[in-house]
Amino acid sequence: MSKKKIVFKFPSFSFNVGFLGSFRLPVLSNARLPLPGGLYLGGGKLMFVGFAAVVAGFLASTFVMISSGENEIVWPQVGAVYEAPSMVGAIHQNPEEPSQRSMTLQLNIGQGERISEILLKDLSLGKDGITNAIELTGTSTTDRLVIETLTVRGSSFPTFDIANSDIHTIIATSSVLTAGHTVSPTLASSTDAISIGGTRNAVNYTADGGSVDRVIIRQTTTGGDVFIKSLTVENVHSYIGQFNMDYLSVGTLILEDLKVGDDGDVDNDSDFVINTSVNVDTVTESIVDADIYIR
């Protein structure tokens, strides 16, 4: 039994493009596509089917793009970890209670990254069981967060602690009220007056308004420092946890209109501490002890 040969023939037209010669393309309006049962799909129907397939593909790809966009976590959405310099984050897993949704805002910064500004403003912090309300940390004495100007103003925390850092100038005004304070840094004239150079192509991170469990800004890789032109904490309040700073190199630290205290007791302990492991060139400090009890 001989097999019937199926032949497709498409009418064509040609056009000339100068020195490249002539090209011949099929004309789909006269094309006929054989179907089972002796039927043919041709002419305008074939063109319509092709057009419909293109439209369906476009709509499907658009839907995928929209769906992906809805799931994207973008700074400063909470409950996420961000890897500088990206503004897109990943879901943060709550280490204390993995079954509960995390509301932590975490920025991881690798060595060598340059950031123009980090601004934390008008934030309400706190979650039972946390240790640190705000954590600013390098990884060691040789891998630090290098910050030209660090400012904390108009804020309140149960406790405040700085350790293992170099700060050229500390300015703590009389508007800083604490339930006991210890300021005992080591005077060291060799402490650098930090000045961050050009910030071209550097990113900014601003979190303005909202409720957060805690804020973590942490160096995550070794082999060099992280460079931040300005870091400001303004009108940020936490009912629990410490403002903790470790392994920093700071040009100027400015503290003003700040309240610190977890018990209202100014006699028996210090809720505000700048440790002896902090090297400093210049200190201007007029902190006032008061019966502050952050609750």
Image (cartoon, grey):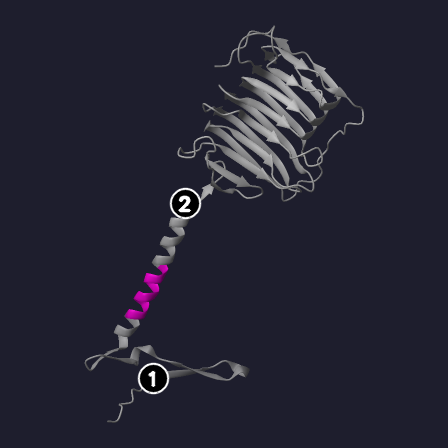
Q: Position of residue 74 (x, y in %)?
A: 47, 41
- For residue 211, what is the image quadrant? top left
Q: 253 or 11, which lies in front?
A: 253
Main SS category, magenta section? helix
The mark found on residue 11 in the picture is 1
Q: In this view, does 78 lie to the left or right of 192?
A: left
Q: Residues within 10 Å of mark 2 (few under 14, many from 20)?
A: few
What's the residue at 74%, 24% (across, down)?
279
The mark found on residue 101 in the picture is none
Q: Is residue 170 above or below residue 247?
A: above
Label 1 and label 2: CA atoms lie apart by: 48 Å
Q: How crowded is mark 1: few (under 14 residues within 10 Å), some or many (20 or more)?
A: few
Identify which amino acid the numbered label 2 is placed on: Asn
| SS at badge 1 | loop
- For residue 13, what is the image quadrant? bottom left
Q: Is residue 102 magenta?
A: no
Label 1 close to label 2 by CB (< 8 Å):
no
Q: Is residue 136 left or right of residue 3?
A: right
Q: 139 or 57, which lies in front?
A: 139
- For residue 176, what is the image quadrant? top right
What's the residue at 53%, 35% (across, down)?
106
Q: Is residue 53 magenta?
A: yes
| SS at badge 2 | helix
For the N terminus, the quadrant is bottom left
Q: In this view, does 56 lie to the left or right of 163?
A: left
Question: Magenta part of the protein: which range?
Answer: 49-58
Q: Mark 2 points at which residue?
A: 71
Q: Can residue 247 be seen in this view?
A: yes
Q: 241 or 49, which lies in front?
A: 241
Q: Position of residue 82 (x, y in %)?
A: 53, 40
